[in-house]
Image (cartoon, rainbow, N blue to C red):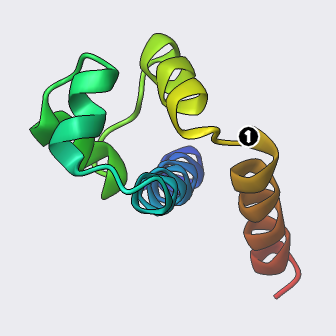
Amino acid sequence: MNEKSRKKDLFVTILGKHIRRKRKEKNFTLEELAQKVNIDDKHLGRLERGEKEAGAYTLGLLQITLDLNSDEYLNEYITIKNQKMNR
């Protein structure tokens, strides 16, 4: 796996974790949230597990529906990336 793929995987994993956390905070089931953003619940599960990337439109809908703040997941990504670089 090249460096670009590892960074992408890290970002997708962090984003998925934040989507899952916000979904649970809002007390949505996987099925309920998937319906609200018009995607398949299996696809949403893959997004939450970091197995798939969200497209821009889907990510926008998720951010609106969940009040998902991009600063949170971007800051976590930057922090982890910087920690790895300083090792």
Q: Secondary structure at mark 1?
A: helix
Residue on which disc 1 sits: 70
Describe residue 81's horizontal placement relative to residue 8 as left or right: right
User: For the C terminus, which image quadrant?
Assistant: bottom right
Quarter of the image holding residue 55? top left
Residue at 69% across / 53% down in the picture?
Answer: 73
Depth check: 71 or 86 in front? Answer: 71
User: For the N terminus, which image quadrant?
Assistant: bottom left
**Residue 67 in view here:** yes
Depth check: 44 or 23 in front? Answer: 23
Neighbour class for label 1 at 10 Å: few (<14), some, many (≥20)?
few
Describe residue 37's horizontal placement relative to residue 18 as left or right: left
Depth check: 11 or 39 in front? Answer: 39
Residue at 32% across / 44% down in the picture?
Answer: 47
Residue at 82% across / 73% down in the picture?
Answer: 85
Q: Picture coordinates of residue 64 (x, y %)? A: 59, 25
Q: Picture coordinates of residue 82 (x, y %)? A: 85, 69
Q: Picture coordinates of residue 16 (x, y %)? A: 44, 53
**Residue 50 in view here:** no
Residue situated furthest top in the rendering: 57
